[in-house]
Amino acid sequence: MEIIHKQDPALLALANLRDYDAVYGSFSWDAARAELDGLPGGGLNIAFEAVDRHLAHGKGDKVAIRWLGKDGSRQDLTYGQLAAASNRFANVLKSLGVARGEAVFGLMGRRPELYQAMLGILKNGSVFSPLFSAFGPEPLKARMTIGSAKALVTTDALYNRKVAAWRGELPELDHVLLVRTTDKPLPEGCVDLAAAMAEASEDFAIAETGPEDRALLHFTSGTTGKPKGAIHVHGAVVAHHVTGRYALDLHPDDIYWCTADPGWVTGTSYGIIAPLTNGTTMIVDEAEFDAERWYQTLQDEKVTVWYSAPTAIRMLMRAGKEVADTYDLASLRFLASVGEPLNPEAVVWSDETFGKPFHDNWWQTETGGIMIANYAAMDVKPGSMGRPLPGIEAGIVERKPDGGVTEITRPMALGELALRPGWPSMMRGYLHEEERYKKCFADGWYLSGDLAMRDSDGYFWFVGRADDVIKSAGHLIGPFEVESALMEHPAVAEVGVIGIPDETAGEVVKAFVGLKPKFESSEALRKELLGHARKRLGPAVAPRDIAFRTNLPKTRSGKIMRRLLKARELGLPEGDLSTLESDEKK
Amino acid sequence: MTPDEARAVFFEELGNIAPEWDPAEIDPGEDIREAMDIDSMDVLNLVIALHKRTGIDIPESDYAKLITIDGAVAYLSAKSGG
């Protein structure tokens, strides 16, 4: 595919990262830290850098969040109003006795209260942990249990539907704060958030957090076992800020729209923190994806920087260039994408449709911020994730039998993508899982679990996952979590869950199910299992397809060989079958 | 298709996507994405299934007309000349 050269002198002059090699060579995290203010008393707090410091610089009246309700309503929140509202929220938490270091979970669609709450939680020195509102009860309960949730901020609708039934099983969950979106009476044992905030003071003394104090808890999924809670600290804000400037080319006068939901790490790091530390005006759209609504928003709000995801971009492609052409999208200056690799066709399509390409970038929940990216003033090779951010050293490594790794520097050699630890937004651990955390490191490298290659120009190319984790619509899904939910159904004897390629979502979840002796496979049972999984897991995690098998392929120890299920499903070579003990029967 | 036929087709395809719900119990004027926890991928799969089943071409710009039961029934019966 042809390289997209950056030639527009006006755009090149405006780019924050004009000379990649020079900046990469001279960058230091200490110097980056100096771009932020720090707390007046000397500490560092994400919420202060995101909001309150702008008040001291005379930006209190600037719009921080322009919220678009799904019913067509609009609400502007200035930096000053956001500071006051988050102070009120922090006061509510404090008055309830929620302490520094304690975890407060957020479960909400994209409503203004969620943004106020997150910033208030950080101001209080508590730890914010986002939950995706399309999760079903089981993923929610698992994450809140592992994270020892002290408080939950949600809406009454979501609480009644997804939480109320099992709330009593979490002994540490003392407080539930509700945004009332229905006309139902306030559920028992819950706080009416609007009423509590109305009574709270607009002044709050931000907790004197330091760079190594815990701030965020982001859950992600592994191949086996429970979800992992990646711990991030207040110092991460240095990386959020700088990567926002370099990889998203954020300028203070930008109108920025990150379409990711704050229930995931992108929607927090780049849907809340980075755009605010950089002083932009950010668009928050409550509504779900709709091609025409999106174009209308880009046009009417004069969005300049747009950060989206491959699944959404491919849905726009399905809708067609003709739809885009009926809108005036001239305000757009920089487009970026993350979540899964952006296929070259989508990069080229966006260049033809918008006159500028989507810039793919790569990072993970664990890395807390963008690690490898395509930049405004650097040529784009469609299909490549780009080059490492200043301050980030990336390499391709090969695992050795002794558990160590060696770097492979040969261009286009296939290996595992690895990073040298030390950047500020790197996770500080998996909560209560020291062993799993240690396994992420070898010989001074953080091992990403992604397979990749590096070309002779230093551009990285994603190849696949080294494990069985599924990437669907940008969300990482652990097969074990899906299998566990299906195993709870009385008809199910065994389950293997894999990701199968999908032209829109990248991958979709498919489950292979073996039934207990008294049960017969049927279309009715297939639908029952599908419904069973959706009720427990929600649509984002549940399988989109289920197939029955008389027997699933297993190793001697009884472990289901997902790899083999996948190879057969896709018609790929079956590979090493030496551990196969009990083979698949259709 | 008559409205009744359109409703039957829509309920069946909706039931294939989200079998945990009985569409007959959903408020026909409510957004199915909220009432039934349907996400964007589900909507896409639903549209593809409806197209396969009825032959009706449903452009992306019409997806929004299919997110309530009443809307979908009216759309499908009108487009099929019913």
Image (cartoon, rainbow, N blue to C red):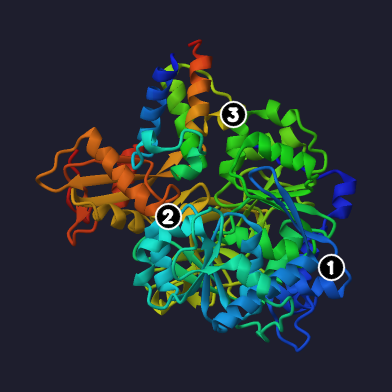
Q: Nearer the viewer, mark 3 or mark 2?
A: 2
Q: What residue type is labelled 2?
A: Arg
Using the numbered discs, state the Cα–Cα distance from disc 2 to disc 1 in whole angstroms.
Answer: 38 Å
Q: Position of residue A393 (x, y in %)?
A: 63, 68
Q: Is residue A236 above or below residue A519?
A: below
Q: Do labels 2 and 1 share a chain?
A: yes
* Disc 1 residue crowd, few under 14, some 14–19, many 20+, Cα 10 Å: some
Residue at position x 44%, y 67% in the image: A188
Q: Name the residue under label 2.
A: A161
Give the numbered dot on residue A60.
1
Using the numbered discs, state the Cα–Cα distance from disc 3 to disc 2 in whole angstroms.
Answer: 30 Å
* Disc 3 residue crowd, few under 14, some 14–19, many 20+, Cα 10 Å: some
Of the numbered discs 2 and 1, the one sitting upstream in the chain is 1
Asked if residue A132 can be seen in this view, the reply is no
Residue at position x 36%, y 28% in the image: B12
The disc numbered 2 marks a residue on which chain? A
Pointers 1 and 3 in contact (C-beta within 8 Å): no
Q: In this view, does A382 lie above or below B57?
A: below
Using the numbered discs, state the Cα–Cα distance from disc 1 to disc 3 in whole angstroms.
Answer: 41 Å
Q: Secondary structure under badge 3?
A: helix
Asked if residue A62 can be seen in this view, the reply is yes
